[in-house]
Amino acid sequence: MKKLFCVFLFLTMIFCSAYRKPYQYVINAEKDAFYHNNNGLNYLREKIYIAALEEFKIAISLSPNTQSTAIFKTNMGKTYMDMGYPALAQQPLEEALKAYGLNLQYYLNLAECYEKLGIIPQKISELEKSSSVYDRITLGILYIKTGKITRGIIALDDFCYNEPDLLITPAIKQYIKDFQK
């Protein structure tokens, strides 16, 4: 009986112990970019700003020309704003809008940056001359920031009327509705 049990145990060990290939790490730039972005957000939450900036730079370099780049650049701009350097935040926030212009929060972040830099009047005069559809969003928000609330709401409402099918339009309508309360 013991011999039979030993043979059975031996055969079980042979058939159950299959050879496994060693793990090979596969580089996936997009997945790694989000990993570094999340690390940056963790550092930002802990107020370790330099490490957060480095993680966002790595994320941008791993995924340079995608829609997610706008997220990484926005996070970089927010980090600079939290550090008290709105001049350094301006470029990443503007680039985030160029990468993806259908997120209202990106416009609000940029308007806050312009406000801290004290360049809202200059930007308003530039944007009034612009023919870009998306510049009207920034213009409306900047009008509101300067106290020209009616003019800002009219500019944003005009955008919503002319561009009803854009993804950002419901967010702008909600922003107008929340602002009027």
Image (cartoon, helix red, strand yellow):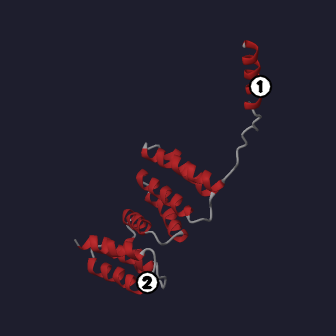
Looking at the image, residue 36 sits to the left or right of residue 126; the answer is right
Q: Position of residue 31 (x, y in %)?
A: 61, 53
Q: Is residue 130 above or below residue 122?
A: below
Residue at the disc numbered 1: 11
Amino acid type at mark 2: Glu
Residue farthest along the top direction in this orientation? 2
179 to the left or right of 8 = left
| Residue at 49% in and 82% down | 132
Is residue 134 at all visible to an observer of this figure?
Answer: yes
Mark 2 nearby-residue class (10 Å; few <14, some 14–19, many ≥20): few
Residue drawn at (31%, 79%) of the image:
153
- Tell me where residue 23 appears, x and y as whole percent: 72, 40
Instruction: Name the residue at 36% across, 66% down.
Output: 115
User: Considering only vertical position in the picture, is 177 above or below 61?
Assistant: below
Q: Is residue 112 left or right of residue 69?
A: left
| Residue to which mark 2 is pinned | 163
Mark carried by residue 83: none
Q: Would you say 25 lies left or right of 177 here?
A: right
Taking depth in this image into account, of 42 and 132 the one nearest to the observer is 42
Q: Which residue sits at x=45%, y=69%?
A: 103
